Amino acid sequence: MTLRESLPWAQYVETLQPHERPMMPGSPASPDKSTPMRLAFGAVGMLVILAGSMGSAVVTANIQNLQGALGVTPVEAAWLPVVYVMTNACMGLILVKFRQQYGLRLFAQIFLMALVAVSFAHLFVNDFTSALAVRAASGMAAAGLSTLGILYLLQAFPAEHRTKGLVLGIGGGSFSAPMARLFAPRLLEIGGWRAFDMLELGLALVALAAVFALRLPPSERTKSFEPLDFLTFILFAPGVALLAAVLGLGRLVWWTEAAWIGWALIGSIVLLTAALAVEHNRRHPLLSLDFLAGADIVRLALAILLVRIVLSEQTSGAVGFLQQMALGPDQLYGLFWAILAGAVAGSLVSAFTLNAEKLNLPIAIALGLITFGAFLDTSYTSLTRPPQVLLSQTLLAFAAALFIGPALLIGVTSVTQKGFHNVVSFVVVFQVGQNIGGLAGPALVGTLETVREKYHSNQLAEAVTLGDPDVVLRLQQLSGAYGHVILDPDRRNVAGLSLLTQQITQQAHVLAYNDVSLVIAALAALGCAWVSLHHLKDVMALRSAPEEAS
């Protein structure tokens, strides 16, 4: 800390140039810095973001290994990422005001120490209940660290280029997913599941040391919390949590077969409606309904949900298909390198080509790339391997990163125009949209794949009859594989029939994944057309403005 930064805020702010002052309470000042200092802030920012997001990425990428380590069923294991989303999605409602009232230093200390404590607790997790508690705490810590990392990245750029840091900060959180899948097999070989815990703890400790060594500039404090804020949070948080449980578990327990899915959905609607009712009658609402109902914010929310849903074609679609074809992590290694490269390239292109006057154009381009990438994946066969999906998955990763910058800036611009008191509302829209969309996408893709697989299985099974000479020949070939193992002809025929059934099921999955990719491509195409229309309307409005002025 410099001598100037140790001054009381009223004196410190007088030493700042207008472009160095924070935009709002709770945000740090941005004094001019040397290039080495900017690089240091950027490096610490990315470290903090990866430290906060890596734990969730590792759990999601290795849920089957964790399921075996804890001795739980697939449905029980699915609660682990869902519980993380429950807490992560809700924290944006209070984190902005926490920074404004108590300052950045306490904010950083609490959430970094929380991450270290959570990571350390992972080392002693031996049962399912403690694992759930740790994942819930991890979600809360990660919500704070994503914000802290972005604030560091903002310091890495001069005032006129600060949006680049914002875009890179949001995009950086997506790097952890492919990274986790890249090093997961190696870590499992080295130390089993405990190796992941040690990695998470190591990242947390390094991030803690870096933040204490390079502190953010001071920020203005102001009294922000009101008693009704906590009532809204008490209603809003469980409402979002119940919705997350429905989306995260509905496909596994199946939507119409588990009664609690319906009750949880009803509870979510009631609680969220009550929270909005409380906010509607407040003089200083935490969630501004007028702001949330604005056309720009509604389009932003729909765009976020749409992109999160269509991008699930990558995680639940292509990767799920290749795993269904019995491909292991080592065989997918090159694919995840391509996905990581696409995400990094997309973030850089988005950050350095961002134009505040043409925000809909890169969103339309991103949706167009998703359309093309998903359409490439509509021709899967049982012989499809990673090289055949390399282009499509790289395009999807690039498009996801390209989309996030302009989408975020649309919300920031709206907040700037309509008042910084709406920042909490924007953060909630963005964070809840990202988290809930991240659950809704796999739920939709998984449900559609299951329904279409059953349909194709029935169709294929009806077409396979023992009266067909080709079927009889195929059955003889499959039975012959057991000729040296099973001597009884009847048992050998049964084994051959079992193999034939497995092949029918596998082919049904192939056709189902093709259907999923086609639906995703159609949704992305509709979104692209919708955003392109708004972009053309904005262009026409800009062209007609000078003519009217003249």
Image: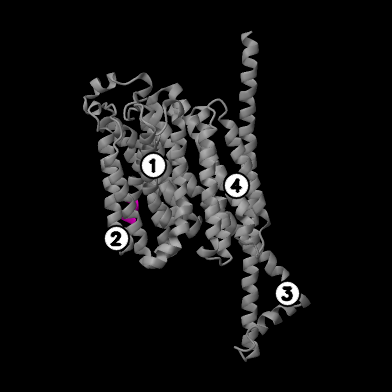
Asked if one can make out residue 195 in the rendered structure from this viewpoint, the answer is yes
The magenta span reads 132-136
Q: Disc 2 marks which residue? A: 123
Q: Disc 3 marks which residue? A: 465
Residue 171 in the image, given as x and y percentages of width and height: 47, 42
Horizontal relation, residue 255 to residue 213: left or right: right
Q: Earlier in the sequence, mark 3 or mark 4?
A: 4
**In what quadrant of the picture does the N terminus appear?**
top left
For label 2, the SS is loop
**In what quadrant of the picture does the C terminus appear?**
top right
Nearest to viewer (mark 3 / mark 4): 4
Residue type, numbered disc 3: Thr
Which residue is at 39% across, 56% downward? 80
Which residue is at 63% across, 11% downward? 548
Between the C-alphas of marks 3 and 4, the distance is 42 Å
Horizontal relation, residue 258 to residue 543: left or right: left
